[in-house]
Each structure stands twice: as structure tokens, then as C-alpha cells.
Image (cartoon, helix red, strand yellow):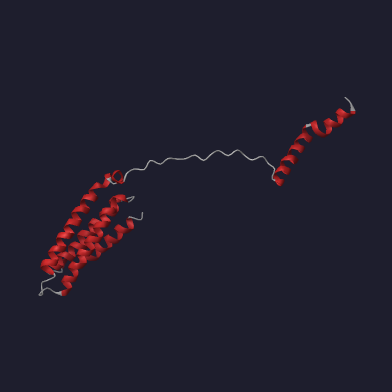
Amino acid sequence: MSWDGVFTYLLFDNPVSSASVAIIKKTGEFVVGLAPKQKQQPPTVIKMDMEPLWKLASSSRCFLRLAGISGASAVILGAYGAHSILPDKEKDQNLKNAFETANRYHFFHTFGLLAAPMCRYPFVSGGFFILGLAMFCGSCYYTAITGDNRLRRITPIGGTCFIMGWLAMVL
């Protein structure tokens, strides 16, 4: 072996020097920013197949039907109150206010019942709305029509059910 071959082996070809040169070369490329760019794959497009709303609501379709019945009964009771309870001069003003409040809440929470199938837990929110309609609106209607205050104690429980129904929509 010639001196030239020994010199080349010591500086470049032996495993220690070749590894050292590779490390220095990579470090220099990283520091200077000359490292070869990694080949980036194009972004993958995920196509979402959206379900129509009528299919999403099909499992809890009973709430849609109950909302229809509730809306119709709210209109019927509102017409009954407007033609028989509210014009009556002998009725107490508090009873008239109770009827108007019951009818207003009946309408508003019918829309909540209509939206219940679109929630994550439709049976929880829908159940609370139905309980609220029965306990809050029902007791207010009963008191306004008959003048009997026996069911007034369950009115706050019905109002709490309304609140729980709206909060269940957040879940």
C-alpha cells in the first residue's frame, strides 16, 4: 500500500472517519438549511357522506308527531282563551295572565320539542319538554279555566323540566 492509499484510508475510508464526516455534513446542512426537503404527500381528501335531516330524526320521529299535536293544541287553546276566557269581564286578571303565560310557554316549548330529534340525546330533552308541557302549561291552563289552585304547586316543577330540556340539548 502506498503512502497515498494509507493517507486516504486514514482520512476518508475508515469507519470512524467516514461516520464523522457524515455527521459533520448532516449537521452543516441542518444549520445552514441545505438539508434536502422531504417529499410531502398530497393531502388526502376525506369525503363525508352527509345524512339527510329526515334520516337523522327518524329514530325519534315520535317527538316530531308530538310537536305537531302540541302545536295544534296550543293554537286551539289560544283560540279558546281569546274567545272565552280573556273577554270575560268577571274572570280575575291573574287567571287571564296565567292562561296567557301557559299559552305562550306552550308555543315556545313546542319548538323545543320539534328540535329535540336533532339533539345528541333526543329522548332526554324531549322527555323533559313533554313533562314541562304537562306540568307547567297543564297546571296553568287548569287554574285559568277552572279557578282551582290545587295544581299550582307542580307549576315550578314543570318550569324546571323546561330548563332541563333546554340544557339537555347542550349535551
Q: Position of residue 28 (x, y in %)?
A: 73, 43
Q: How many numbered marks appear?
A: 0
Q: Which residue is most to the right?
A: 3
Question: In terms of depth relative to the viewer, which is nearer, 138 or 84?
Answer: 84
The residue positioned 24% from the left and 60% from the top of the image is 132
Q: Does 128 appear above or below 85?
A: above
Looking at the rendering, in which quadrant would you find the C terminus?
bottom left
Residue at x 71% of width, y 42% of height: 29
Front-most of 53 and 27?
53
Report the quarter where the N terminus lies: top right
Quarter of the view holding residue 30: top right
124 sits left or right of 138 in the view? right
The image shows residue 112, relative to residue 146, as above or below, that is above
The image shows residue 91 at horizontal and vertical percentages of 12, 73
Q: Answer with left or right where residue 32 lies relative to residue 91.
A: right
Q: Is residue 101 above or below residue 52?
A: below
Report which quarter residue 113 is drawn in: bottom left
Q: Nearer the viewer, residue 68 or 129?
A: 68
Instruction: Tell me if residue 154 can be seen.
Output: no
Residue 70, horizontal then vertical, whole percent: 19, 56
Left or right: residue 72 compared with residue 116: left
The x and y percentages for residue 81 are 14, 66
Q: Residue furthest top?
A: 1
Towards the viewer: 29 or 143? 29
User: Is 150 on the left or on the right of 49, as rendered?
Assistant: left
Residue 56 seen: yes
